Image (cartoon, rainbow, N blue to C red):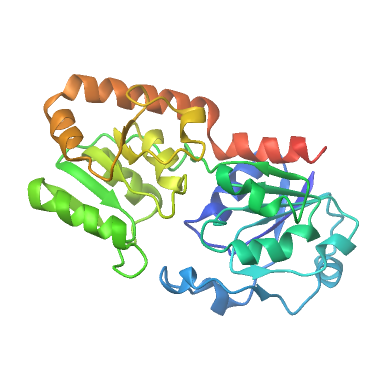
């Protein structure tokens, strides 16, 4: 099947993972948005405003010169208008509805199906598109894999800690850092990120607005022990607290950190169970197959 994948072509984002998964079974084409739109810092990307390509979907397909069977747009700051006028089956995977709901509401009606990464927010888009489904994020086993490295960090966090956009996360990490050997890394992606997870006895996660984020699946896929906030929002549909990962409540994971730093055998058993389930059920290949199946292709 020939698939047109529309997204910001980041080498270390959801687009790349979807492309890698789709190319195992399909031919994938991509229309590149203007270069300036691919050069957005993490902070700028949080100011989501809908941008549209100057070219319509019909015109773009004509220039592409391929008989496309399916159009999949993956959440990004750019959008190609007129997809609903092409007559080609289409779907939109809305990743960051917890940050940019108005953008997603605006474009949702243009697609045959909408897939929402955050379970609690399917209802936000369903009034705009009755074919809205929950489809969480995932891992890429070829990238998020185990590395044979020493556990040199007691606890680590890989991600953004901007005081304006991630205030709760920063305050919590500041408290952890005063008591434990905490290492924070920013702008680290792909295999380099996976290696940092593997170097850590505890991989720490704190959501933004209660999102079931990529870090959950990616950390587990490296065989790392994950300590994450108990956000509901689908987390318990897939994972059991104390079996696949450990979830902290009341914004205070201090006692749990101390306990699992001292209990290595228990920690590693949980990490192994988390690795097994995420590899079995939660890869991007699983997600792409579900999108295609639900889309009736």
Q: Say left or right for 21 vs 201.
A: right
Name which residue lies at 13% across and 52% down.
Answer: 177
Q: Say left or right for 98 vs 276.
A: right
Q: Position of residue 215 (x, y in %)?
A: 40, 45
Q: Residue 161 is drawn in which quadrant?
A: bottom left
Name which residue lies at 44% across and 28% down.
Answer: 239
Q: Among all residues in the image, which is located at the extreme left?
A: 179
Q: Say left or right for 178 vs 189.
A: left
Name which residue lies at 23% across and 53% down.
Answer: 172
Q: Position of residue 31 (x, y in %)?
A: 70, 66
Is residue 225 positioned above or below 58 on the image? above
Q: Quadrant of the C terminus?
A: top right
Q: Residue 33 is drawn in which quadrant?
A: bottom right
Q: Position of residue 190 (x, y in %)?
A: 41, 51
Q: Say left or right for 7 vs 152.
A: right
Number of marks? 0
Q: Quadrant of the N terminus?
A: top right
């Amino acid at each position: 099947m020939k698939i047109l994948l529309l997204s910001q072509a980041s080498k270390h984002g959801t687009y790349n993972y979807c492309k890698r998964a789709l190319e195992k079974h399909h031919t994938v084409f991509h229309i590149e948005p203007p270069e300036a739109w691919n050069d957005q810092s993490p902070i700028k990307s949080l100011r989501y405003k809908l941008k549209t390509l100057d070219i319509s979907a019909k015109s773009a397909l004509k220039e592409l010169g391929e008989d496309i069977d399916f159009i999949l747009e993956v959440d990004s700051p750019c959008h190609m208008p007129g997809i609903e006028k092409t007559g080609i089956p289409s779907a939109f995977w809305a990743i960051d509805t917890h940050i940019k709901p108005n953008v997603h509401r605006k474009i949702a009606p243009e697609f045959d199906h909408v897939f929402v990464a955050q379970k609690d927010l399917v209802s936000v888009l369903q009034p705009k598109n009755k074919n809205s489904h929950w489809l969480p994020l995932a891992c890429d086993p070829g990238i998020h894999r185990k590395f044979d490295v020493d556990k040199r960090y007691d606890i680590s966090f890989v991600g953004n800690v901007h005081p304006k956009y991630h205030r709760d996360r920063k305050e919590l990490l500041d408290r952890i850092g005063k008591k434990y050997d905490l290492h924070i890394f920013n702008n680290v992606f792909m295999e380099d990120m996976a290696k940092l997870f593997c170097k850590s006895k505890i991989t720490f996660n704190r959501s933004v607005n209660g999102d079931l984020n990529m870090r959950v699946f990616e950390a587990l896929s490296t065989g790392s022990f994950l300590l994450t906030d108990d956000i509901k929002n689908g987390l318990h549909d897939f994972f059991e607290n104390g079996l696949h990962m450990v979830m902290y409540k009341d914004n205070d994971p201090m006692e749990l950190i101390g306990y699992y730093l001292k209990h290595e055998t228990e920690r590693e058993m949980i990490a192994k169970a988390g690795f097994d389930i995420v590899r079995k059920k939660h890869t991007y290949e699983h997600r792409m197959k579900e999108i295609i199946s639900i889309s009736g292709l």
